Structure formats: C-alpha cells, structure tokens
Image: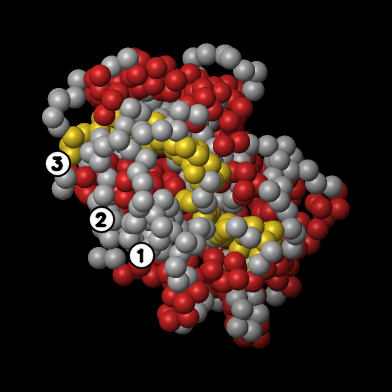
Amino acid sequence: MKGRLIYLIRFYLLTVVIFMTAKWAFMLCNHTVSSFSVSDMLAVVWHGLTLDLSTALYFLSLPLLVTMAGVWLKLPAWLMKPYYAMLAVLFSIAFVTDTSMYPFWHFKLDASWLQYLETPTEAMASVTTGYLILRFLLVVILSVLFFFAYAYVAKAKEWQKGTWKEAVLYLVLIPLMVIGIRGGVGESTTNIGQVYYSQYQFLNHSAVNPIFNFFDSLTNPLEEIAQYKFFDDEECEEIANGVFTVESQHCDTLLTTDRPNILVILLESAGEQFASSMPHLQELKKEGVYFSRCYANSWRTDRGTLCALSGYPSFPSISVMKIPEKSRTMPSIALTLKQQGYTSCYLYGGDINFTNFRSYLISTGWEQIISKEDYSHKEQHTSQWGVRDEITFQTVYDMIVSARDGESHLWGYSTLSSHEPWDVPVKRLSDEVDNAFCYLDDCLFDFICRLKQTPQWNNLLIVMMADHGIINGQIDQTTPLQKNHIPMLWVGGAVRQPRIIHTICNQSDMPATLLGQLHLCHDDYPFSRDILSETYTTPVAVHNYSNAQWICDSTGHVLYDFDLQRLTISESSDTLRLQRLDKAIIQLTTTDFQNRR
C-alpha cells in the first residue's frame, strides 16, 4: 500500500514541478517581450500554482486507476511507460509551441492554433527553416528528458496485490481528485482568471498553464460565445442606444460620382505605428480623404478582412470566417454592389484556402478570385507567404487599366509582404520590420503614380486600410491604443477634394460609409455605421482579442478582460459608463451572431 501511494505522490509532484519550471522557461525565452524581475518570476509561479495543481490532477487520473487495478491484479512494471511517453511528447509540444508563438501572437496556446494546421505551409510561412528545425530538436530533447524523468522519479514497481482497505482508500481519493480538478466545492470552478494578478498582461500570461488553456478552449466556440450575457435585452439595447444606426443623411459628398470603379486594398498589419516607415502613404493622406481616428476591430487577417468587407464585428473567442455556416450569412459590399451592376474580383497572393478565405469570398458574392495558384511556380515562391507585393500590385494595375469602359467594377486586394518573417527583396531600413513596411509603401506609391497617368484614374476610388495592427516592441498600458490605430484613406480621381475626418470609427464602418457616399441603402449591415452621416452621433470604436474587448470614445478608453471579469486598463473620465457600453456592444453583436441562419 505504502509503495503505491508514494508512486502516485511522486508522479503528481513531478508533473507540478514540470509545469512550474516551464513558466520560468517561458519568461526567460520571452524576455524581449516585457521586462521582469526575479521577484516577478517567483510571483508568477506562486499565482499560477493553483491552476498547475488542478491540471496535474487530470494527468494523475490514469495512474490512479491503474494503481487501483493493481490491488486485485498483478500488473507489469512497464505498463505505464507508454503513458509516460505520451505525456512527454504532449508536454514538449505544448511548451515549445506556447513559448515560441507568444512573441508573434501575445496570448497563450489555445485551440485556435489547430485551425492553422489545415494549411501547414501557410501557417509556417512566418518563420525560417532553421527556426522550425531548432524547435523540432527542442521537442525531441524535452520529450526524452521528460520520459526519463517519469521513468526514474515515478518508477512503478510490480507490487503485490493489496487489501480491501487500500481499495477503499483509492475510492475515497476519486471524489477528492474531482474536487481538486474542479477547484473546490463552491460555484466558481477552475479557470484562467484565477491566476491573473498583475496589471501587466505578460506576467498574467506567464502564470497561465498552457495545457489547461488549450484544453479549456476546445469547447464549442458557438457555445463559448454565449458567455457574453450581462444585461436583460431591454437594458442592453438602452445602454447601446444610438451607437448603431443604419440610416445615411448627408449634406455633402466626398466623391465626384456615385458610381465610381472601386478598389479596396487591405494593407497587411500596416498600423499607424509604422507611419514613419511609410512616408509615401503620409503624402497620399494630403491628397485624399484621411480618416485619422480609425481603429481595427481585431488582431488577425481573417477577422479584420471580414470586418472590412462585411462591416460585421469581430469576437474575442472565434473567427467568423472559419465558421462557414455563419460566414455565408454575412452582408458584403460585393453582394450589395452586384445588385447595382458591379462586377467583382478579389486578389490575394497567398493560399486562398487559408482560414476558409475562399469559402467566405465566394459565399459573399465575389465573382472572381485570383490567388497564389494563378501565378507561375517561380512567382509563387517570391516570399514565404506566396507572391510578393510588387508582383500582385502589377496584377491589380493590369486589371484596372484593362477594364471595359461603361462597366462598373469592384476589386479587392490583400497585400502580404509586411508580415513575419519580413522577407522583402529590398533593404532600405536597418530594422527588418520597418523595412518590410517601407517596401509595402514603395509598392503602393509606385502603383498609385502609374495609375494617375491612365484615363481610368478619373473614375476610380481607392479605399485603403490596414487589416489590423501588430504589437511591435514592449507591451505597456498604451499598447491597445497604439496597436489598434490603423489608417483608412480614400484616394483616386473620384475623390472631390482632400479632407481629414477626425471622427472615431472602426474598420467595420467602411462598408456603410462607402455605400452612404454611393447613395445606397445599408440596412443589411446592422453594425456598420456611416460615420459621415448626421445620424452618427455616438462615435465609438471597439477592438477584441483573446477574450478581452477594448473600447474607445471621446472620454478615453478601457480594456475589459472577460476571464478576469474586470478592467485591466482604465483611462477614461467616464469609466463606469464606458465599461457598461463595452459589455452591451458585445452582448448585442454576439446575440445577432448566434441568431444568424
């Protein structure tokens, strides 16, 4: 009896020690993301301990059952070794992936990463071959170390059969383990928020057990989205009253025509924090209509693209584009303009099947799709993600200048070179990130200059905006404001005169604003607002990621964490009202999403 109990205790403690050590490895490997002290490292382990203890109990379940069976059956000592091998590989992959990906995504390992395994070539395009080889070797080495650690520390012996008293003891342990896994007998169960303790998200994320976070996120996303219920429906609508309007009332217009040819360009990751690296874009702002206070809805291309093209909001826990039964219900500027006689074409130089992109475009009315597969083999490999921007800009140019007169055209285009690993064919700036955006800026400027020399320029409206921003550098309290701020600029011969619009807005407001200028109804876009309309009286912008939502209006901005259930950033003169509005907006939008058929 004593030997079997010691075996279980050793196994459990070893698992907990592995989890604790992984936290320090995570912090040390990501020291460039945020600064921290030795006391912070100790605090991370201490605050994350409860989650580690609960998570370790999950993996203790099988050894406990095998030990119970050993009371009646004579089991071989090697029986648990396959289990040790499985845990060793599982833990190694989880820790290496979590630690390696955090500098890119700035949140912990979760189930959303499984979706990128459907197109592994694209998912790995942001990193070099050497980077992948090193991580693979780390997984192998850690797997071997973990296996031998379990085989030595938690060595199972070929014990003799036990007594009925020992069997009763193990039966008593089962409900105790369930209580430990649950996190107690109270209403609150084990969750990520219980380890949050700091105003600095890096420390909170370091305290989170990545394995628990991964399995916790495997639940049905359509069920997860039901968590955003804070008010009665009537109270929710009252709080958000006036935020979302679908009428357009104008006393002037930005355009010389209400039926221009339209090109929408989504600039990969080109947040306003890279303005100094894109001087040509700053010059273009002086000759077009520049929306100076536009903010991205989300943090990834698949989410930001849908926000921009469908005028639909993003959500913290799911990507709408990756759920075909929902994405096909989205409104779309392609569908709306098709009813006005427009033909449409979308160009993306990467894998169009990535993140269900093709399905979304087709189901929302884009008639022609051009992607990496339409280029030569050589062109397909001009960048890690596919066809580099100077080549795809040329394709867009050719489409515009060859368009038939007398027809109305809508083109959509996503750039891709300003993305990790920042592999562009020129070296203008010493910083590789800034250099990639400088390359994008050069490609864009050359494209615009050549178009200006063509007769097609006179009837052309180019709407350009970033699909999202990125975190580049240290994380601090102002990061959401800096990262979410993106440019939206309208240029072209169809623009009446240069203007700067200082109104707060989201990228999802572009469709309604565009359709308002074309004197077209946008009732199908319940959450896209015409920010130039006299009915737009409550300027507000939201941005969400990793189960948190940021909101900004004239009083300031706040960030609410739904795991922690409290504000983590509060820089507003009217915090309580803004927090309530933040909750009301996500409740309204998720309710609409759930009801879509």
Position of residue 394 in the picture relative to residue 304 (left or right)? left
Residue 70 percent location from the top left of the image: 58, 71
Q: Which label sits in the foreground, 2 or 1? A: 2
Q: Is residue 400 left or right of residue 264?
A: left
Q: Is residue 329 left or right of residue 476?
A: left
Q: Is residue 330 left or right of residue 67?
A: left
Q: Amino acid at mark 2?
A: Cys
* Residue 432 point in image, percent of width and height: 60, 23
Q: Residues within 10 Å of mark 1 (few under 14, many from 20)?
A: many
- The answer to whether residue 515 is visible is yes
- Nearer the N terminus, badge 2 or badge 1? 2
- Is residue 74 at all visible to an observer of this figure? no
What amino acid type should be assigned to the residue bearing mark 1?
Answer: Phe
What residue does disc 1 label? 593
Q: In the picture, which quadrant includes the C terminus?
A: bottom left
Task: Give the residue drawn at x 44%, y 68%.
Answer: 242
Q: Which quadrant: the N terminus?
A: bottom right
Q: What residue type is disc 3 on?
A: Gly
Mark positioned earlier in the residue sequence (3 or 2): 3
Which residue occupies the foreground of this view, 485 or 217?
Answer: 485
Q: Which residue is at a point 68% across and 37% down the rendered structure image?
A: 473
Residue holding disc 3: 341
| Residue 497 to residue 239: above or below | above
Across and down, in percent, residue 14 comes to 71, 57
Residue under numbered circle 2:
521
* Residue drawn at point x = 41 percent, y = 33 percent: 497
Looking at the rendered image, the disc whose residue lies closer to the viewer, 3 or 2, is: 2
Judging depth in this view, the residue of 255 and 9 nearest the camera is 255
